[in-house]
Amino acid sequence: MDAPVPESRSAAPLRPPPAGAAAGPSGPGAAPPPLVEAAGLAFTVPTASGPVNILRGVDLRIAPGEAVGIVGPSGSGKTSLLMLLAGLERPTGGRLRVAGHDLAAMDEDALARFRRDHVGIVFQAFHLIPTMTALENVAVPLEFAGRRDAFARAEAALAAVGLGHRLGHYPGQLSGGEQQRVALARAVVAGPRLLLADEPTGNLDRATGAQVMALLFDLRARLGTTLLLVTHDPALAACCARRVHMEDGRIVADDGGDAAASAAGAAVPAA
Ligand SMILES: Nc1ncnc2c1ncn2[C@@H]1O[C@H](COP(=O)(O)OP(=O)(O)OP(=O)(O)O)[C@@H](O)[C@H]1O
């Protein structure tokens, strides 16, 4: 578990997103369009005791390649924001574009394709399929996508997280840290433009958590992936170049917002 993370050594190495997808201006001096554009984003859910306003007008732009830590007290809406960005929940108000897709306008099938093509997610719980090996767990999303190189890519992803020697192990035969590394491999195997992590070290001891975080940032740097990290830990948030602070369903502080906004170019058009 404490072994250093080896470099990828498979015949099908992890690849960054296609040229122009993750970063890079489209012309001389041009800033890339933002990967995430949220304006007045609202998320309200009905409950037996009436509607609950979980997000109350979130404005957020994130440029390709940024690493953003989302912090804030429990119940402030961090996970809900992440679920919207992932296309796992649908906004009830405002605008949300991710990787050029208007998520509020997409049906369930389109959202599933969006997630498959653009998003990798790591949660606090590992969410591995217990009856599948590490290799199968990582290959499954690619197989569903009809990728004939699913297993070769899964093997490369597991090698990249230091688990090239654990391909045939089932989750129950792996430590917590190893299981989270499998989950990380699964999250990045398809080369997502957006990597979302929600308290990914919450179930791990400090040393193992530190290893997983180092791996997360290493993969992000190698793949050029945009990262959103939800965390209660200020030290982990400090690993991100930009921190966004949420309270009561709103962003109340953003130490990179201006720079990111100017780097990202045009504002989100009005609804
Ligand atoms: N489906 C739902 N129905 C009702 N209320 C919900 C639902 N989902 C979230 N909430 C409420 O919305 C608020 C925000 O929840 P969310 O999980 O986004 O917060 P959080 O900042 O991630 O919290 P934590 O740090 O504790 O994980 C909470 O008060 C939560 O109880």
Image (tube, rainbow, N blue to C red):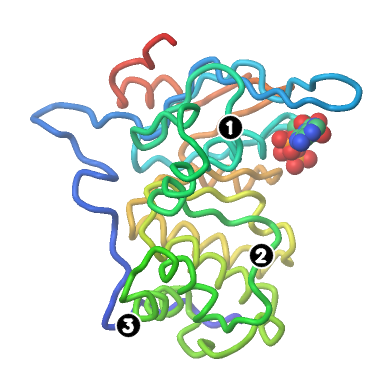
At label 3, the amino acid type is: Arg
The C terminus - image quarter: top left
At label 2, the amino acid type is: His
Number of residue marks: 3
CA separation, marks 3 and 1?
Answer: 39 Å
CA separation, marks 1 and 2?
Answer: 22 Å
Can residue 73 be seen here? The reply is no
Quarter of the picture for ligand 1? top right
Can residue 70 be seen here? The reply is yes
Disc 1 crowd rating (10 Å Cα; few below 14, some 14-19, many 20+) is: many
Label 3 or label 2, whichever lies nearer to me, is: 2
Disc 3 crowd rating (10 Å Cα; few below 14, some 14-19, many 20+) is: some
Please tell me whether mark 1 sits on a helix, a strand or a loop: loop
Give the residue at mark 1. 90
Give the residue at mark 2. 127
Tell me where residue 49 appears, x and y as whole percent: 91, 22
